[in-house]
Image (cartoon, rainbow, N blue to C red):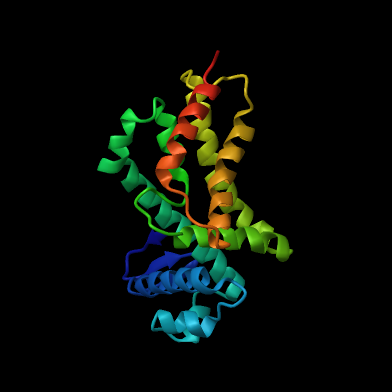
Amino acid sequence: MSHDSGNVINVDGRDRRPWALISRTKLLDAAVAEIAERGYDRARLVDIAARADLTVGAIYNWYKNKSELFNAALEHAITEQQESNLNFLNSELSKSLNGVFSSHWMLLIAALGPRQGQNTGPTDAQKMLLEALTASWRDEESPQSIEPHLSALLSQYENVVQTAMDEGAIDSTLDAKLLARMLFAFPIGLSLLTLAGLPEINSANFIPIIQLLDKTLRPE
């Protein structure tokens, strides 16, 4: 995105008025909410437009079809979640966990997942991520557009794990990429089970398991 000398902003190769970005944000928020609530297959552009108080034509001013809107909404949801993650890392709740976990990398991994301790139910970001994974094997074209988002998230896990290895908090003989992928898949699997109707598990019950995992992964 770049600014020119006039009252126009170039977004994705097209000139837009600054106020148009407000409409796009409303549209993406509406798309995330609709898809998270109804699922990608049942979400309709007319309903997304209604949520955003826009016309369907306004959607096509930004996105050429439902698939392109979904990809943009997924990126929007993940970006917002990452901002929420940063807030969580700086929160009093996060600071209170410093005495619970002996390794700071555990807190970083917890913050990367699309949910934190203050959430009382599945987040829209969780649901969008699951929708993306579902779409990636149902739709032949989806993997090409969704994979970069998943790779970006996975790379954050890999960075945390590799840094912890470099600092001696994790056994450096382990496969960093494999460990990162396992840590990435864990909250996604739990989210899927919860959304499928299984009862929630008290977050405090995970603490002794995570503490044992921390000890197990340390160098001998």
Question: Going by the image, does 121 lie left or right of 199?
Answer: left
179, above or below 59, in the image:
above
Q: Can residue 90 be seen in this view?
A: no
Q: Is residue 117 visible?
A: yes
Question: Going by the image, does 122 lie left or right of 95?
Answer: right
Q: Residue at x 60, y 39 (%)?
A: 182
* Residue 21 locus on image (x, y percent): 37, 70
Q: Which residue is drawn at 45% across and 86% down?
A: 55
Q: Which residue is drawn at 63% across and 53% down?
A: 147
* Residue 65 locus on image (x, y percent): 60, 76
* Residue 163 locus on image (x, y percent): 48, 27
Nearer to the camera, 118 or 154? 118
171, above or below 160, in the image:
above
Question: Going by the image, does 71 lie left or right of 83?
Answer: right
Task: Specify the quadrant of the image occupied by residue 111.
Answer: top left
* Residue 5 locus on image (x, y percent): 32, 64
Q: Which residue is drawn at 72% across and 65% down?
A: 138
Which residue is farthest left? 92
Nearer to the camera, 6 or 176? 176
